Each structure stands twice: as structure tokens, then as C-alpha cells.
Image (cartoon, rainbow, N blue to C red):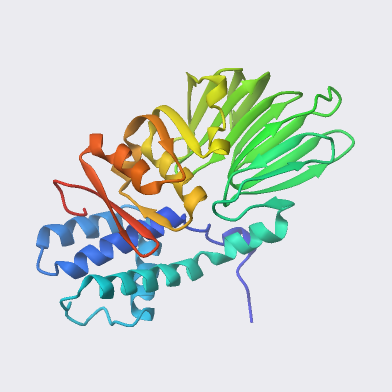
Amino acid sequence: MSHAPSGTRKPALPHQLLAEATERMLAVRAAPADAALDARTRAWIDADERHRRAWALAERAWIASGEALAAPPRAANRNRVVVRVAAVAACLVAAVATPRIVDTLRADVLTRSGEIARSTLADGSEVTLAGASAIDARFGADARRVALLRGAAYFDVRRDPDRPFVVAADDLTVTVRGTAFDVALGSDSIAVSVSRGTVAVAAGAAEAVLHAGDRLDYRKADHAFTVAPVAPDDVALWRQDRLAVSDTPLGEVLDALVRRNGGYIVASDELRARRVTGVFDLGNPARALGALLAPQGASAHQLGGVWWLRERSTPAS
């Protein structure tokens, strides 16, 4: 049996993209005669190779949950819909489980959804992990390196001028010698917020230096940096089950809610990109989503462990 070279392996799909593909498929199944919806769905699938992969997985998950795609849609009560959505979500979890298993095997410290853990690293630095987060720490004679594999972490770094402390999150790195800062690895972006000291942030050829009271947002789609002020006391406020944001993508708050409460939150890329400001209660997702979505003209509906977010005036598109 031959195997493809490791360099040709396709990257794992984000949970959010799989959830969006599922929502679109369910919308098409509920309105098979809607030609406009069908056209919008096909355009979304054709727009990106990752969309095509996510759609194929959603179709397989639907079939595995017990109903052929070719079968005509049947009227369903709320309980049946809850069961079907939960079954599809479970199948999608299986489709994306491998990267999380790899993270678990690599991790030195990891947390479950809703769990916050504080640990002391080998050099005496302290790290606090949000729910559903994981890090891999590798310290040597010349450097201290930590990989944020998923989630969010607040670091209080012990000063050591001879050994820089480097945190890597995807293709972004944060380098410090002694400071306190937060790194949140989201589906769409990475945020770095500094409560004390100074850090240098780099991604490819782009670099920025942040001081106490600075927050950097890095958009994965276009590798762009944006720096804005943040109150030092609001950095890593998730440690108190709250999140304070100012002109921040709504998707970042959704990622924090999932880390705190588990499950899935399905929202369009357009809705996730909307800018929001406020302080939100992470321990009460219904209240937080209500406060987030009301100004956006959107609403949230919970089915099993899945929250579906939609603009009130428009169907899924």
C-alpha cells in the first residue's frame, strides 16, 4: 500500500466551517424548491476548495445520521429536529477528531470546555488556560518556547534576559522577556493583549511591538495586523467568566463562548465579521448571545448542543 507524502496532506477543516456547511445543507433540505437558495449554496460551495470538502463531509454526516439525501423532506416536530441535528453534529465531531487527538498527545497542559486551569511552567512562569485549550512547552538552555495548540492562554512570564520566551499560535509568534499577556487563537483571527510589559509580535514579514494596554488582532484570511488600546484590567477577563471587547469581530466572542460552554455555534462569515463592543457573561450563553445579536438584527436558536445564529430578515444564504 502506498501513502501520499506528508507534505501533500490536506489541512484540517475548522469546526466553524463544518458547522456552516451543515447549516446550509439543512436549509436546502428544508426548502428543496427554493432556486435562489440553491444557487447561493452552489456559489458558496464553488467559492473555495475547503467549502467543497466541508460540504462533502456534511453530506456524509447527514447520511450517517439516518436519512438518505435523495429522500424528500418530511414534516418534523421539534424533538425530531433536535435528534437529527445532534446526530449530524456527532458525525462531524468524528470527522474533525484527529487534529484534537494529536493536540492532546502533544499537549503539556490542556483543559476541557468550561474548565480554567492555572499551571507553573518549568522556568517559574505561570500560564492560565481557558476552556478547550492546550499548550506544548519546550524549554532549553537558550530559549523558552510554548505552542498554543488551541484556545486561549494568559501568560505571566518570569524575566530571563538570556532566554527569550516565545509563544507560537499558528503562524504568529509572540516574543517576550518578562511580561504578562493573553493570546487567543480563534477560528478567524488571533488576538494578543498585553497587561504588563512589552512583547514583539511577528507573522511572516509583518511585525509589531505591543506595550501594556495594547491589543493586536491578526486576521488569518489576509494576514493583516490591527492594533488598538485595551484596558489592562480587561486582558484575559475570561478568567472571571466575562469578556470585554471593543470594536471586535463578533466571531471572537462566539469562540470564547464555545471554549466556556462547549458545543457549536453556527453563524455565517458575514455575521462573525460584524464588529461588537461590550462586556459579556461567558457563563450564560443565552444572555450573551441575546446582547450580541439584538443590535445586529439577528437571533439565536438552540437545538441540542448547537446554537444556530441567523439574521431575522434573511434566510440562510
Instruction: Residue at 12% x, 57% y: name it.
Output: 36
Locate the N terminus by quadrant.
bottom right
Frontmost residue, 171 versus 269: 269
158 lies above or below 26: above
Residue 49 visible at all: no
Toward which corner of the image does residue 280 lie, by quadrant?
Answer: top left
Horizontally, residue 120 falls left or right of residue 90, namely right
Q: Position of residue 220 (x, y in %)?
A: 47, 39
Horizontally, residue 208 falls left or right of residue 294, namely right
Horizontally, residue 119 falls left or right of residue 273, namely right
Q: Residue furthest right?
A: 141
Frontmost residue, 53 versus 23: 23
Instruction: Residue at 59% x, 56% y: name it.
Output: 112
77 lies above or below 181: below
Q: Position of residue 274 (x, y in %)?
A: 31, 35
Residue 173 visible at all: yes
Instruction: Residue at 15% x, 48% y: name it.
Output: 314
Horizontally, residue 211 falls left or right of residue 166, namely left
Q: Position of residue 14 (x, y in %)?
A: 47, 54
100 lies above or below 201: below
Instruction: Residue at 31% x, 52% y: name it.
Output: 47
Q: Position of residue 119 (x, y in %)?
A: 74, 43
